[in-house]
Amino acid sequence: MDRQNLTLLTDLYELTMMQGYFKNKSQNETVIFDAFFRNNPFGGGYSIMAGLEQLIKYIKELHFDEEDIDYLRSVGIFDEDFLEYLRDFKFSGDIYSIPEGTIIFPREPLVKVIAPIMEAQLIETAILNIINHQSLIATKSARICYAAEGDGIMEFGLRRAQGPDAGTYGARAAVIGGCIGTSNVLCGQLFDVPVKGTHAHSWIMSFPDEYTAFKTYAKLYPSACILLVDTYDTLGSGVPNAIRVFKEMKEEGIDLSFYGIRLDSGDLAYLSKQARKMLDDAGFTDAVISASNDLDEYLISSLKTQGAAITSWGVGTNLITAKDNPSFGGVYKLSAIMDDNGTFVPKIKLSENTEKITNPGNKKIYRVYDKASGKIKADLICLENETFTDDKQLLLFDPQEPWKKTLLPASSYTLREIMVPIFKKGECVYTSPKTMDIRSYCLEEQNTLWEETRRLFNPHQVHVDLSRRLYDTKMRLLDQMGNLDMTDVEN
């Protein structure tokens, strides 16, 4: 994790293609690549954009060290003139992106790269690696926090993450998605997010008895005294010993400003309800009951339905690994090439799978909101030189089934462009907000979703539409690729 230069964090074929362009192109032509994804993970109705801060850092530090060049020489497939070119390599293009914490939907560009083709090709793998991972974890976190209905969710999956990077950047993404903090101290240090935690069963087992362990811990941390009560017998000894310690601390005049118990095993619904009654009967109605034990959004939702008396949740493995959907599926596709006149010529990728046919050209995205509610109605992908204003009627149509149309009356909706410039001519023009500020923005963003889109099962899918000009451009390219000349065909 301490390696600053991640230039070789790429697939070999990016470099072999670079050498191919270097050898065979008369000029390093400017192109446009779009990074996007095709389906929301977890069967959900939305996703969360994350990872831009690390992407910016990667681009800023992009260069080939002498040891990088020596290694590439040792591979035996790169010529000296190409390796010499790499010595002075730096990114010189433009990058546009949807900001972190923003709600995102399938098929719309998350990151747009406008750069000489060799530069744009090299950075593909790292862009996808960074954005795919953090967007996946941020999305999982948002779902878990939604299921908790306002209760605090703490991320503590570091020991189960796929390595230090995944554990640390994943924890950051989890906080962006809505977690109130993380157990990962390195994440706390790097990104200035709250770190939280209690103690392990080993703490209890290392003392002569449970009561002594609780008492010792409470005296050490009276302002963060959450006692793990399931080491031996949750209701028979754990909760009673915790209550005994709380009473003694109160009698000694020690203010327990944040205190309670944690459950890590057993029937969490039953145990929490019984523990709540015991704590309330003892006068500790403000004591927190937190829970862990392989939680995810589905189990939390179920426990809520069962009336579990839990108000704080610790989520580890299933969050940090996105266990039920371990990859985001983002892709990076060429959408335009600049010709000799400085005009971008749109390009399209065909496929027998309709969802894999790309949207061509230089594009931007308008988010369309219902003016009365502030909720998202649709996203509209259009060509860069198109302009839409909310003082005119707006016709939206499904690009897969274009006969399905919606006409929005003028002034019944509002518009917002959601892509912003990040790099211009190789220089960063964007300042990343602090992680906790991104979290606040992300919570506001989630409130622009209809409840039908946020629900965990069978959510409503938000429409991502194309402008008429972009749709016609796409159809024209499809006809051309199919060798169909439609010029003189009657409609």
Image (cartoon, rainbow, N blue to C red):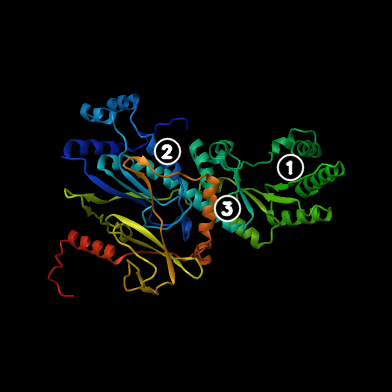
Which numbered marker is on residue 223? 1
Q: Where residue 327 sits in the image (x, y, percent)?
A: 44, 48
- Neighbours of disc 1 within 10 Å: few (<14), some (14-19), many (20+): some
Residue at the spot 56% in from the left edge and 45% down from the top edge: 317
Q: Residue furthest left?
A: 488
Which amino acid type corresponds to the residue marked 1 in the rendered image?
Ser
Q: Is residue 392 above or below residue 482?
A: below
Secondary structure under tag 1 reads loop
Which amino acid type corresponds to the residue marked 3 in the rendered image?
Asp
Q: Earlier in the sequence, mark 2 or mark 3?
A: 2
Figure disc tally: 3
Question: Is residue 141 visible from the viewing direction of this image?
Answer: no
Q: Where residue 151 sits in the image (x, y, percent)?
A: 64, 55
**Which of these two is toward me, 368 or 237?**
368
Q: Where residue 414 sits in the image (x, y, percent)?
A: 43, 66
Quadrant of the rendering where the C terminus is positioned = bottom left
Q: Where residue 134 sits in the image (x, y, percent)?
A: 47, 46
Residue at the spot 25% in from the left edge and 56% down from the top edge: 350
Which numbered marker is on residue 296? 3
